[in-house]
């Protein structure tokens, strides 16, 4: 079975067929699945999906690009939002804090970037408090993310650098600190030279499988709505890069995911 470590099935792009699609995943060899929040509403929806489906688990957190736009976040502020996340993190099937991090691609203003770092550190502190690993989003913020994650490593916080997009050298620094690297459909793209090199140069024991669905569909479905059934394309590409069998990629990545998201019992779901 394939362990899907990063999906967004609460997204409106799944509104028409969500129930049928989710019900089919175990039959397609996908289980368990971690549904990842990005704002308060999607975080709460992730928890509701986890309550409804035995094989779905939740990650709760505020994406860096959401701290300026969410109406409830503006109402609650940082302290109130962290309090709500703390409540959601107490649910038995909440297995991570995420996705959290930094995104300087859209937000260029120094003041906004400073607020992102403040929220990032606050959510890392919550992860330490509730003893959960973190799912990290980082875009155009390599240096600041690495610096803050060094602090997190010193606090004993575990996690994954989701949808990894930086150099192999930076990936190796994360691996040295004990972090995992999330690899999804981008690795199949023709222009994914850095990610291919990263997969080649880091141990298989440091790689997690993910889709980020409905985004980032792999070749040959690039540009279409993505879902967890496309992970075999990612597995095949990783196997090709590493010179090992697809089965070994699937099994090692599954073990990696159970090591990180340790609240999930290995025999449940089976």
Image (spheres, helix red, strand yellow):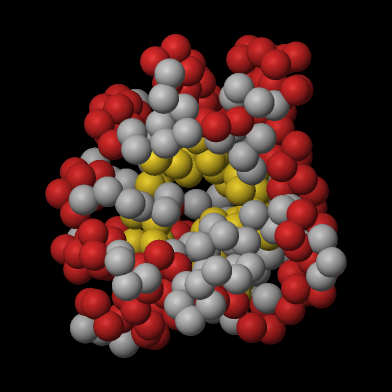
Along the line of sight, the residue nearer the viewer: 32 or 35:
35
Q: Is residue 144 above or below residue 264?
A: above
> Residue drawn 65% across and 48% down?
58
Tell me the residue at 28%/61% (across/down). Answer: 195
Residue 196, how many percent across, how many down? 25, 67
Residue 52, image quadrant: bottom right
Q: Is residue 186 visible?
A: yes
Residue 150 lies left or right of residue 137; in this view the side is left
Compared with 59, 127 (above or below) is above
Q: Residue at x 40, y 40 (%)?
A: 138
Is 46 situated left or right of 234 in this image? right
Q: Is residue 146 above or below residue 182?
A: above
Question: Which quarter shows the C terminus?
Answer: bottom right
Q: Quadrant of the N terminus?
A: bottom right
Question: Which x, y percent locates residue 163?
Answer: 42, 54
Give how far across and how far down residue 102 sits, in percent: 43, 32
For the point 19% across and 54% down, which residue is it? 168
């Amino acid at each position: 079975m394939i362990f899907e470590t990063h999906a967004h099935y609460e997204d409106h792009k799944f509104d028409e067929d969500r129930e049928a699609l989710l019900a089919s995943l175990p039959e397609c060899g996908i289980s368990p699945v971690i549904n990842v929040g990005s704002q308060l509403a999607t975080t709460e929806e992730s928890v509701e999906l986890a309550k409804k489906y035995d094989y779905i688990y939740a990650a709760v957190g505020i994406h860096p690009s959401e701290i300026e736009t969410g109406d409830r976040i503006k109402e609650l502020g940082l302290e109130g939002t962290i309090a709500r996340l703390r409540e959601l993190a107490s649910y038995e099937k909440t297995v991570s804090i995420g996705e959290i991090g930094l995104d300087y691609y859209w937000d260029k203003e120094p003041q906004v970037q400073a607020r992102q770092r403040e929220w990032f550190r606050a959510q890392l502190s919550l992860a330490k408090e509730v003893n959960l690993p973190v799912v990290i989003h980082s875009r155009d913020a390599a240096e600041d993310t690495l610096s803050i994650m060094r602090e997190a490593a010193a606090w004993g916080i575990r996690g994954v650098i989701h949808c990894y997009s930086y150099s192999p050298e930076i990936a190796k620094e994360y691996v040295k600190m004990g972090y995992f690297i999330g690899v999804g459909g981008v690795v199949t793209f023709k222009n994914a030279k850095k990610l291919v090199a990263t997969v080649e140069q880091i141990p298989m024991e440091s790689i997690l499988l993910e889709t980020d669905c409905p985004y980032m569909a792999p070749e040959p479905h690039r540009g279409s709505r993505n879902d967890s059934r496309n992970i075999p394309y990612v597995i095949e590409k990783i196997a090709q890069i590493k010179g090992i069998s697809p089965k070994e990629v699937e099994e090692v990545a599954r073990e990696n995911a159970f090591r990180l998201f340790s609240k999930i019992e290995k025999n449940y779901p089976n």
